[in-house]
Amino acid sequence: MPQPGEPQDVLAPPAVAAIFLVVTVRPGGEDAVRGLLPDIAGLTRAVGFRSPEGGLSCVTGIGAELWDRLYGPPRPAGLHPFRVLGGAVHTAVSTPGDLLFHLRARRMDLCFELAGQLMNRLARYVDVADEVHGFRYFDERDLMGFVDGTESPKGRDGVVAVRIGDEDPAFAGGSYVVVQKYVHDLQEWDALPVEAQELAMGRTKLNDIELPDEMKPSNSHVVLNTITDADGNQRQIVRDNMPFGTVGAREFGTYFIGYTASVEVIERMLENMFIGDPPGNHDRILDFSTPVTGGLFFVPTADFLDDPSPQLAAAAAASADKPGPDAQAAEEPAARAPTSPDDGSLGIGSLKGHGTS
């Protein structure tokens, strides 16, 4: 089993500017993608070298369907098409996307130049499904006026939150990323009293302080996005959301981007938000903010982008070691076969249980 490779720059500091570029790959474009992936790090260095203080970075994610076209099975364990989540009132939609490029810097011109270089290589082989230019808004606030990403883990906690480990050793060091483009109805939102906005969010607006538990409604954004495991430990994701908008078109929104080591964590958050916990108790924010895109991508290590062969070979070997469905089926009857009870009886009681119902 290869050692985990160098991760991509998932845990880069919050950016001032970002471009989120999602493309679909046309049939026959697979070789162009294979040719680009090892060169992305070099393109990023070449553009970033012009302004080292700009902190340019690029994270590349690969969607499930393109993964199969590029590499075949097996996929990373958590990689699948984004799941539509339809609640009684709101729906998390799934939209096309084969590749995600998350470009970040302290200057938009660096992101713009790198995005152009990427598209110079791909333009004949892909279609742009979505392109969003995000910007820092005052002190890390979204356009609804609240500070965004306060609880996003940093340091070691951030690494634990995003980095795949022994649970999928062939793809250790990688991450998953979920993106959704939310469009806000600011006219309706701004008509709410600040106190009502704070109850919807679960935090104070000016000071960005989380409300006491006894004050947070069960449908507040904070409550429904707090996920714990069976032992009561909080499961976290790393967010790098950015505001976006066009004043003339009166479009205002937040681009949600969440990195995680376990897709289940984000999917549980989304289930709570859209279906509700309990069902019907949906996130109050959704009454003012609508997702118009949804995508799930695997973020391989930088080493994988440079040369996927070692990890693909390890994944194939691990898959071959697992018993297939036929082998499992052959083993199950034996595993379930009744054994003679220790008391020497025929176990009539258990036979009754199965045979007379």
Image (cartoon, helix red, strand yellow):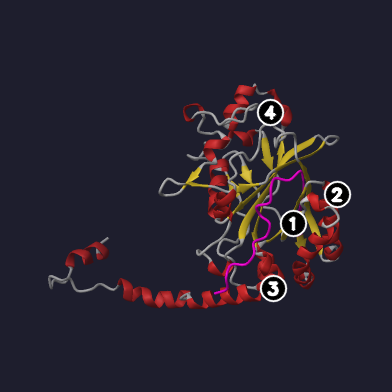
Q: Which residue is mark 3?
A: 307
Q: Residues within 10 Å of mark 3 (few under 14, many from 20)?
A: some
Number of numbered labels in the structure image: 4
Direction front: furthest residue: 53
Q: Residues within 10 Å of mark 1 (few under 14, many from 20)?
A: many
The image shows residue 126, relative to residue 317, as above or below, that is above
Q: Nearer the viewer, mark 3 or mark 4?
A: 3
Marks 1/2: CA distance?
14 Å
- Kindly indicate whether the residue at mark 1 contacts the one at mark 4 (C-beta within 8 angstroms): no
The image shows residue 250, relative to residue 74, as above or below, that is above
Q: Which residue is mark 4?
A: 189
Mark 1 residue type = Cys
Question: What label sits on residue 177 in the rendered view?
Answer: none
Where disc 2 sits, the SS reads helix
Where disc 3 sits, the SS reads loop
In the image, residue 195 lies at what x, y percent?
Answer: 60, 22
Q: Which residue lies at the image location 52% right of the left edge and 29% below the top edge?
A: 216
Mark 4 or 1, nearer chain start: 1
Marks 1/3: CA distance?
18 Å
What are the residue bounds of the magenta stretch?
1-23
Question: What label sits on residue 109 in the rendered view?
Answer: 2
Q: Which residue lies at the image location 60% right of the left edge and 38% below the top edge?
A: 89
